[in-house]
Amino acid sequence: MFFRTIRQKLLSENKFSKYLLYAIGEIILVVIGILIALQVNHWNVERKNDFKVKIFSMQLNF
């Protein structure tokens, strides 16, 4: 809601260059969020794989 008012204000004042900068900044924030989510997912998958390897190696020892 806060960002919507900023966007509408910039467009109503015909400040397209500032709006374009705002839009690019918003896109960058979304991309950073997606990259963080992918990294967290990767860490979780690695953690699960390490756990499976540990369990498998423990089963081989017995």
Image (cartoon, rainbow, N blue to C red):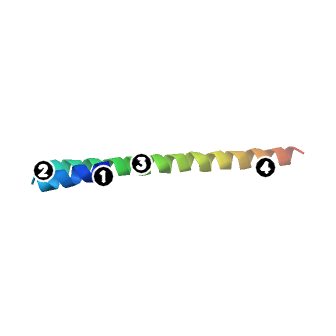
- The residue carrying pointer 1 sits among few (fewer than 14), some (14 to 19) or many (20 or more) residues within 10 Å by Cα, namely few
Dot 3 and dot 1 residues touching (CB under 8 Å): no
Examine the image and state in which quarter residue 4 appears: bottom left
Number of the label disc, if any, that sits on residue 27: 1
Q: CA distance from mark 1 to mark 4?
A: 43 Å
Q: CA distance from mark 2 to mark 4?
A: 58 Å
- According to the picture, the residue beneath numbered tag 3 turns out to be 33
- According to the picture, the residue beneath numbered tag 4 turns out to be 56
Q: Amino acid at mark 4?
A: Phe
- Secondary structure found at label 2: helix
Q: Residue at x 15, y 47 (%)?
A: 18
Query: Along the horizontal axis of the image, is 27 left or right of 49?
Result: left
Q: Amino acid at mark 3?
A: Gly
Q: Residue at x 18, y 51 (%)?
A: 9
Number of the label disc, if any, that sits on residue 35: none
- The residue carrying pointer 2 sits among few (fewer than 14), some (14 to 19) or many (20 or more) residues within 10 Å by Cα, namely few
